[in-house]
Amino acid sequence: MEGIEHRTLNVNRINMHVAEKGKGPVVLFLHGFPELWYTWRHQIVALADLGYRAVAPDLRGYGDTDAPVDVASYTYFHVVGDLVALIESLGVESVFLVAHDWGAMIGWYLCLFRPDLVKAYVCLSVAFRPRHPKMKPIPTMRAVFGDDYYMCRFQDPGMEDEIAKYGSEAVLKKIMADRKPGPASLPKENPFAISADAKLPLWLSQDDLKYYSTKFDQTGFTGGLNYYRALDLNWELTAPWTGVKVMVPVKFVVGDLDLVYTTPGMREYVHGGGFKKDVPMLDDVVVLKGAAHFINQERAQETTSHIHDFIQKF
């Protein structure tokens, strides 16, 4: 990761840590849960070498970026507001967007709210899902998948205490090493249990895990969990965007073992015409065989190639 520069910018009334490298058109990378700018370490170096300015922030609530306490400070409007201010601070009119997991969700709403700022979007793992005017997210997920569904469990104010019992390193190892197809659940007994002899996946070194766990030891998980806790509030606030289509060129890349992609109904939506209807400029859908959720790390070179192949068209 030699040559990656780090700085702190004041955006949208918070201090945001940003990692960047290279010169040229900006590629903005958005990480997911439970991650950091570090998830893009391979792509930052590779895209910089290909003639781009790769920029990867810690999103609000994560790493070295400020973490407001209030759940209501984690709406799409707050986080997209951070990104709008970040893009302005970079001195460019628009960016190429690459995002994964929760970053992908935020990416969809950046495209929805400010399509003028996004030249093209490479979305990893989490497809766009339109707002359903009669289905509030958490009660709907609870009814369909049960109380142990991970997004429902993350609503519990005691979740941080449960995580603390295991420690950041064990919890991160459990989440990142898990290849079980969705829907993901966290049983109330031993939610983050992992066998003592469980090995790290080949794409995640002990040093990588230590980088993540050290940061989460310092900050805790509340910031990341607050994105889930704001889901119902987001549903209420985005009522004016019901039925609005995403009008940005998009490439979608996902692993065939991904816990979101394998959640009931998702593959049908992605491949059955619903996704294309909601995202008319969807250009390509790529399914990586044998890959799970963290494809930008598990299949780093392949993911980088998919990113570059798409953004070089524009």
Image (cartoon, rainbow, N blue to C red):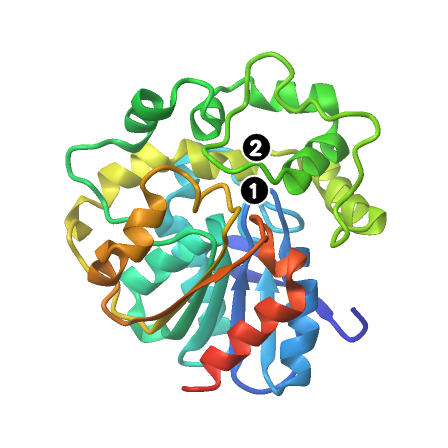
Residue at the image position 25 percent from the left and 54 percent from the top? 272
Q: Which numbered circle lies on residue 222?
A: 2
Residue at the image position 45 percent from the left and 58 percent from the top? 82
Q: Residue 175, image x and y in percent?
A: 63, 37
Q: Residue 94, image x and y in percent?
A: 41, 78
Q: Earlier in the sequence, mark 2 or mark 1?
A: 1
Q: CA distance from mark 2 to mark 1?
A: 8 Å
User: Mark 1 — residue?
Assistant: 67
Residue at the image position 58 percent from the left and 47 percent from the top? 66
Q: Quadrant of residue 176?
A: top right
Q: Residue 268, image x and y in percent?
A: 30, 48
Residue 1 in sight from this viewpoint = yes
User: How many numbered marks does the figure carry?
Assistant: 2
Residue at the image position 50 percent from the left and 31 percent from the top? 184
Please state which of the two labelled residues, at mark 2 or mark 1, is closer to the viewer: 2
Mark 1: which amino acid? Answer: Ala
Circles 2 and 1: CB atoms closer than 8 Å: yes
Left or right of 205 on screen, residue 150: left
Q: Quadrant of residue 281?
A: bottom left
Quadrant of the snapshot with the N terminus? bottom right
